[in-house]
Amino acid sequence: MITTETHAAHRYWWVLALRGLFAVLFGLVALIFPGIALLALIYVFAAYALIDGIMAVIVSLQERISSARWIVLLLEGLASIIIGIVVLAWPGLGALLLLYLVAVWAIVTGILEISAAFMIPGSTAQEWALALAGILSVVFGILLIVRPGAGLLALLWLVGIYAIIFGLLFIVRAFQLRGKPIRSIPGSS
């Protein structure tokens, strides 16, 4: 029996792919332009967090009736929006604050992604990309907290590599959803 969540995931695969694409683009900017000014990095990260958060909130609200995972996606989206607004509001607080904001954001979204991957019993084999992205996020956030003195350039490279891997995993998951055959749900049209 196929669930309405499977239909929702299949219908919105492209949103997951866009989130992945934005993450990859953000990562490439961080790697290709290592001399980017701190203020530019702050604004690029804030824009990414805001866009990612807004997309997650929109999908969660549209799927709140048919998906048990909508609240996790909503919380992830709200966390991203809050972090994006904080970074935009106080860009002059310095690189260390940005480092800790990125770390907290990565840990929070990672925990929520891991939670979402394990919410549906028996679906772990299908949710490996989401779980792996969540684990990567948590590990990345912890590394940033443990090694804050590594420098902004190192942060820039770490953020770039993380964003590319994270984005690619989301793109893989999106195309898994897109290619998954959908059978009709009994009682639906």
Image (tube, rainbow, N blue to C red):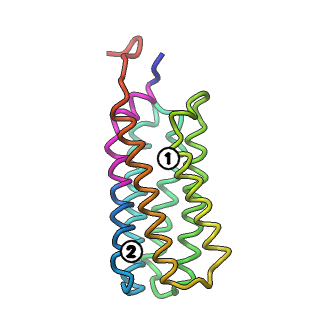
Q: Residues within 10 Å of mark 1 (few under 14, many from 20)?
A: many
Q: Nearer the viewer, residue 155 or 13?
A: 155
Residue 176: x, y in percent?
A: 39, 36
Label at residue 180? none
User: Residue at 45% of width from left, 83% of height from top?
Assistant: 91
Query: Mostly what secondary structure, the magenta segment?
Result: helix
Residue placed farthest to the right in the image? Answer: 146
User: Residue at 42% of width from left, 85% of height from top?
Assistant: 38
Q: Nearer the viewer, residue 47 or 158?
A: 158
Residue 53 lies in quadrant: bottom left
Left or right of 155 on screen, residue 118: right
Q: Nearer the viewer, residue 122 or 55?
A: 122
Above or below, comparing residue 91 to residue 129 in the picture: below
Above or below, comparing residue 67 to residue 23 in the picture: above
Residue under circle 2? 31
Above or below, comparing residue 96 to residue 160 in the picture: below
Residue 165: x, y in percent?
A: 45, 58
Residue 141: x, y in percent?
A: 60, 66
Amino acid at circle 2:
Leu
Quadrant showing the C terminus: top left
Judged from the image, the secondary structure of the residue bearing numbered disc 2 is helix
Question: In the rendered structure, does residue 151 fall within the stretch colored magenta?
Answer: no
Judged from the image, the secondary structure of the residue bearing numbered disc 1 is helix
Residue 74: x, y in percent?
A: 49, 48
Above or below, comparing residue 61 to residue 20 in the picture: above
Residue under circle 1? 73
Q: Nearer the viewer, residue 74 or 1?
A: 1
User: Residue at 37% of width from left, 52% of height from top?
Assistant: 55
Amino acid at circle 1:
Leu
Q: Residues within 10 Å of mark 2 (few under 14, many from 20)?
A: some
Residue range (magenta): 4-20
